[in-house]
Amino acid sequence: MQRILSRAASAGGRLRRCSAAFSTDAPAVATEDATFVEAWRKVAPQIDPPKTPLSFMKPRPPTPSSIPTKLTVNFVLPYKSEISNKEVDMVIVPATTGQMGVLPGHVATIAELKPGLLSVHEGTDVTKYFVSSGFAFIHANSVADIVAVEAVPLDNIDPNLVQKGLADFTQKLNSASTDLEKAEAQIGVDVHSALNAALTG
């Protein structure tokens, strides 16, 4: 036990010494990788160094000194942008740890999404989506980037089909004979249960 504790302590020391700066501490303006450029020029001085991903990234906006009154939201799917640079009052996302409300000035966070209800609050208007999975990236400058694998406006979901799907997958789960069949049926039950909860909640 003592060896485990001493190893953990020494590892913690190494992590503290090697820890990188948080994204909020990084410069807002994209910088060139000077070490790479210097090494490149030694090997091939007649050829311009190739551009790195950093060269194509837009500079990160600076963190405001005061909390903004609005939250800027980007909500994208693999095939389209659902919301782009929209200023709202709040979003609530279905994180794996539970429903998470995001207001302007929220601490920088990355949250994994589970099947559930995502709601965008703009004054008295609330737009609701059912999302299958994804991630929410909450930045220190009151910008929220939400990436979902699939999302459907809640108004487009047929409650009768949800009930039928839930009954079908529950039956498949009860009659499943292999681990694969059980896993597939369990996913179907979980998704349809989340759909039903979003519709009835």
Image (cartoon, grey):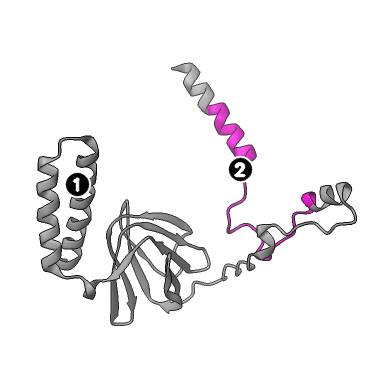
Query: Residue extending furthest top?
Result: 2
Q: Check if residue 23 falls in the magenta segment.
A: yes
Residue 111 or residue 165, whichever sits in front? 165
Q: Quadrant of the C terminus?
A: bottom left
The boundaries of the magenta stretch are 9-36
Task: Locate residue 118 relative to residue 144 in the image: left or right.
Answer: left
| CB within 8 Å, label 2 to label 1 | no
Residue marked by disc 1:
185
On screen, residue 7 above or below 123: above
Q: Quadrant of the N terminus?
A: top left
Task: Locate residue 73 relative to residue 52 in the image: left or right.
Answer: left
Q: CA distance from mark 2 to mark 1?
A: 42 Å
On screen, residue 18 above or below 103: above
Residue 160 or residue 141, whichever sits in front? 160
The picture places residue 115, in percent across and down from the top left corner, at: 28, 57
Choose mark 2 or mark 1, whichever is in front: 1
Question: Callout 1: few (<14), some (14-19), or many (20+) C-alpha neighbours within 10 Å?
Answer: many
Question: Callout 2: few (<14), some (14-19), or many (20+) C-alpha neighbours within 10 Å?
Answer: few
Query: Residue extending furthest bottom?
Result: 124
Q: Which mark is residue 19?
A: 2
Q: State the SS at label 2.
A: loop
Q: Quadrant of residue 54?
A: bottom right
Q: Check if residue 85 falls in the magenta segment.
A: no
